[in-house]
Image: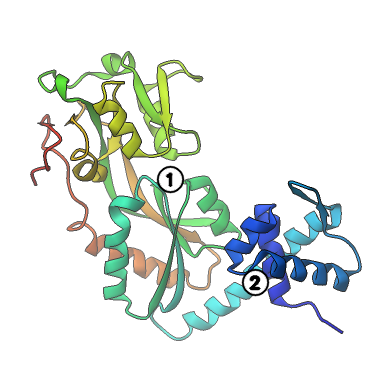
Amino acid sequence: MTHLTIKHLRYYDALARHRHFGRAAEASAISQPALSLQIKELEGILGAPLVERGPRQIRLTALGEEFALRAREVLRAVDDLASLARASTGPLQGRLRIGIIPTIAPYLLPQIIGRLADRFGSLDLRPREAVTSRLVRDLVEGRLDLAVVALPVSEPALAEHPLFEEEFLLVRPLSQASHPAPGLDALRAMPLLLLEEGHCFRDQAIAFCKLPPGPSGEIMEGSSLSTLVQMVGAGIGVTLIPEMAAPVEARSAPVVVQRLPAPRPGRTVGLVWRRTNPLSDQMADLARSLVDLLPGAVQQGPAPNAALSHAPLDH
């Protein structure tokens, strides 16, 4: 007789998260028929259906929903046992699942990976890019070990450790290079291009500009900072970008980058991880190491009140 295994739980957890056999199979690195067979085998072991299979989508049964929650708790406990064993062996080593938000990943991820590899040579780094809400959920549910995000995330289950602070810079068409940096009232009246909903950077920009709820003042949303900067270069409007992105994005379009007058907008970038993770002490040590290692890797933007064209930034 076949018995319930951790493998069954992991495959079912993937299906419960993705609600799609193809995407769940891809996330699990197996074929779709193999995943379907594992789920049918699991249902046979339990003697009850977990999934309602439709032509285009699936739904979990009432048992399936409850089973998904319990399976997730078991998998988190199993991962914590592995982490407990790793914690007893000394310095951080083995697999490290690290999440990072899209407005940081292209500009900082290579430096983070390089410096962690130098500092913790036996780490097997598994990076994943996603918006903050998804990273927080995956951390709490045990699918990630730590994440690089904008602080605070205000999740009681997570510990937070700041790494550095950076400003938000204004990007406007190159034709406006001679214009002084606008004050808040003038900025609020400009056509502001924003990231699509779900990005915390969008929420921070809206909060700084004190924009009203709804589409007022927004004429375009984009999925990346690169898209927004290209649209600014085409004369569509203006946008804000984090300082670390300026050296990369300002080269790619005819734009000018400016610091805003005080009080300038900005964010705190930091690490977060589950407080209950047996590796919590090692995570704190890793965070302290990054604080020491990153300042030289985080490229700075323009000098105060300076304007920069699409040419490479001066440092």
Q: Give the quarter of the image for residue 202.
A: top left
Looking at the image, residue 63 sits to the left or right of residue 149; the answer is right
Disc 2 marks a residue whose amino acid type is Ala
Decide if residue 142 is in sight here.
no
- The image position of residue 269, as x and y in percent, is 34, 49
**Residue that mark 1 sits on:** 152
Is the residue 94 above or below the residue 112 in the image? below
| Nearest to N terminus: mark 2 or mark 1 | 2
Q: Quadrant of the N terminus?
A: bottom right
Q: CA distance from mark 2 to mark 1?
A: 26 Å
Residue 77, disc: 2
Instruction: Give the left or right position of residue 130, taking residue 40 as reference.
Output: left
Residue 307 visible in the shown view: yes
The residue drawn where x is 29% and y is 61% is 110
Q: Position of residue 75 (x, y in %)?
A: 66, 69
Other-residue count near label 2 (Cα within 10 Å), few / some / many at <14 / 14–19 / ≥20: some
